[in-house]
Amino acid sequence: MTEEVALRFSITRNHAYLLVETSCALVARLPNTLAALERGDIDLYKASKVMQLTREVSDEVAAQVDAWLTKRLAGRDPGAIRGSVSHAVQKFDPEGYRERAAKKRALRHISLEHHDETMSTLSGHLPAEVASSLYASLSRAARARRNKDKTRTLDQHRADIFAERLLAEDGRGKPRAHIHVYVDFLTLVGASNDPATLAGYGPIPDWLVREIASDPDSTWSRLITDSATGQLLEAGADKYRSPASLARLIKARDRECTQPGCHRPAEFSEIDHITFWARDGKTNQHNCHSYCTGHNLLREEPGWSAVPTGDGGMIITTPSGHTYETAPEPFHEPRTGPDDDEPRV
């Protein structure tokens, strides 16, 4: 159901999951919160805060929290509502809260979220005391550096120290980034200002990609495209496409998971057949594509199917009968003219 909602509304899987989960909780377990939503005392975003902090408690505890919140929702901001819900959960289920906290601490992880204008957020989901200690350590180092360098703000120093510590090998040595950037040759040499593509992020401006390319530690791979379509023809120096070179071509062509709405970079995804190999699906660039593990497994669920349209494109059919067509984005705009008869490097 989550995947259906995500495709139907063209939203992420996480957003769709939140909509479905909130709707089910309001109807089945949080009648007072639902009533506040229907009266206009709160919006759906505020209602989701109640759901999120009661999703793992029993129905009995959820009912107690929901009743306790009856007069504590209207006119309050999301942060205040979240604080009240957390207080109520601990009040009515102290032992359960302790057990859930232990499980949550075992689920610590790092996540990456991309934003506009070449920026992203790298965040750590950590135990509160660990996160607080890390931030305090960064702040102390930033203040010391700020005393010597006034050209950057305290926040800028803090962010720069954070990046330096993470990129350095074992906390020592020169930082080195490992990223995949796909750029048209004309943009690379400054003859065009078309954006390039940063894997997992999306378009980045021409000036930034030239800055990345000028780093002496950058490594290069040649990709040959069709000037008339902008689609990839070959990846790597050899014309003979062994399985390894086929994999390079597919990952470079797709750049990310080919499920609509999923932007997991191709280098962290799997290469698989659109028409299954067991059903005579061919192992070539037309029937193979990049899929993250979750969406690859989704194809095995009843009612889901995909038909290849060529060069990694496909038509997806969902259990509800809706269809969605997807195809790799070209590397550049089609170029036609007397000098564009040959593949462009």
Image (tube, rainbow, N blue to C red):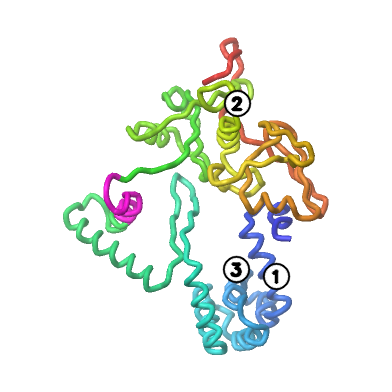
Nearer the observer, 296 or 92: 296
Tell me residue 236's x, y (percent).
52, 26
Q: CA distance from mark 1 to mark 3?
A: 11 Å
Q: Residue at x 32, y 32 (%)?
A: 216
Q: CA distance from mark 3 to mark 2?
A: 51 Å
The first of marks 3 and 2 along the sequence is: 3
Nearer the observer, 115 or 246: 246
Q: Residue at x 57, y 76 (%)?
A: 53
The first of marks 2 and 1 along the sequence is: 1
Nearer the observer, 14 or 191: 14
Which residue lies under the disc numbered 3? 45
| Disc 1 secondary structure class | helix
- What residue type is disc 3 on? Tyr
Nearer the observer, 273 or 21: 273
Which residue lies under the disc numbered 2? 241
Q: CA distance from mark 2 to mark 1?
A: 50 Å
Q: In terms of image quadrants, where is residue 73? A: bottom right
Q: Are marks 3 and 2 in contact (CB under 8 Å)?
A: no
> Outermost residue, top direction?
338
Q: Residue at x 66, y 31 (%)?
A: 285
> Outermost residue, right direction?
321
In the rendered image, residue 33 lying in the magenta stretch gets the answer no
Residue 196 sits above or below residue 106 on the image = above
Q: In terms of image quadrants, where is residue 131? A: bottom left
Which residue lies under the disc numbered 1? 23
| Disc 3 secondary structure class | helix
The answer to whether residue 72 is seen in the rendering is yes
The first of marks 1 and 3 along the sequence is: 1
| Disc 2 secondary structure class | loop
Please provide the residue range marked out in magenta. 159-174
In the rendered image, residue 163 lying in the magenta stretch gets the answer yes
Q: Taking 235 as reference, is 66 left or right? A: right
